[in-house]
């Protein structure tokens, strides 16, 4: 196919993937994850060390809504008092209350 092989002319089927990095950053932030990028400044070994440190210093919080809670979107907000700490977490979730 002309223009790169995919339907629509480009290698990705006509889709624009130029903002893929920002999409990955957004996805990782919204799902409580972290984004790591390989660059000329940091080696793969250095990134693995960062990931290892992050995994070692994680805490897991759980929450169970009240039995009378209604269905719908629930916003989650978690903060810390120490300024040098970073909180990774979901922005919220959808509850399916039993009716």
Image (cartoon, rainbow, N blue to C red):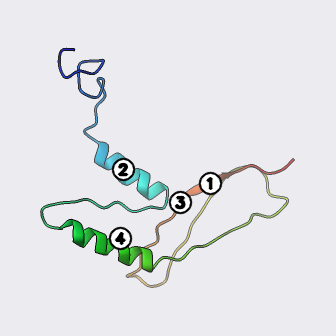
| Residue 2 position in % (x across, y down) | 18, 15
* Quarter holding residue 3: top left
Q: How many marks?
A: 4
Give the structural element (helix, strand or loop) at label 2: helix
**Whole-number angstrom distance, CA of label 2 to CA of label 3:** 15 Å
Q: Earlier in the sequence, mark 1 or mark 2?
A: 2
- Location of residue 76 with respect to 7 vertically, above or below: below
- Contact, CB < 8 Å: mark 4 with mark 3? no
28 with respect to 65 (left or right): left
**Whole-number angstrom distance, CA of label 2 to CA of label 4:** 17 Å
**Whole-number angstrom distance, CA of label 4 to CA of label 3:** 19 Å
Q: Nearer the viewer, residue 81 or 62?
A: 62
* Residue positioned 23% across, 70% down in the render: 45
- Contact, CB < 8 Å: mark 1 with mark 3? yes
Give the structural element (helix, strand or loop) at label 3: loop
Q: Earlier in the sequence, mark 2 or mark 4?
A: 2
| Residue 93 position in % (x across, y down) | 62, 54
Q: Residue furthest bottom?
A: 82
Q: Earlier in the sequence, mark 4 or mark 1?
A: 4
Q: Nearer the viewer, mark 2 or mark 4?
A: 4
Q: Which residue is mark 4?
A: 51
Q: Nearer the viewer, mark 4 or mark 1?
A: 4
72 with respect to 15 (left or right): right
- Contact, CB < 8 Å: mark 2 with mark 4? no
Query: Is disc 1 surrounded by few (<14), some (14 to 19) or many (20+) residues within 10 Å?
Result: few
Q: Which residue is mark 2?
A: 24
Query: Is disc 2 surrounded by few (<14), some (14 to 19) or many (20+) residues within 10 Å?
Result: some
């Amino acid at each position: 196919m002309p223009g790169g092989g995919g339907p629509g002319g480009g290698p990705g089927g006509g889709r624009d993937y130029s903002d893929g990095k920002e999409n990955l950053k957004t996805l990782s932030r919204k799902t409580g994850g972290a984004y790591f990028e390989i660059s000329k400044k940091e080696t793969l070994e250095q990134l693995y060390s960062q990931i290892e440190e992050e995994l070692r210093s994680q805490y897991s919080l759980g929450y169970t809504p009240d039995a009378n809670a209604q269905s719908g979107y629930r916003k989650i907000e978690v903060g810390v008092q120490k300024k040098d700490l970073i909180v990774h977490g979901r922005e919220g979730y959808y509850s399916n209350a039993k009716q």
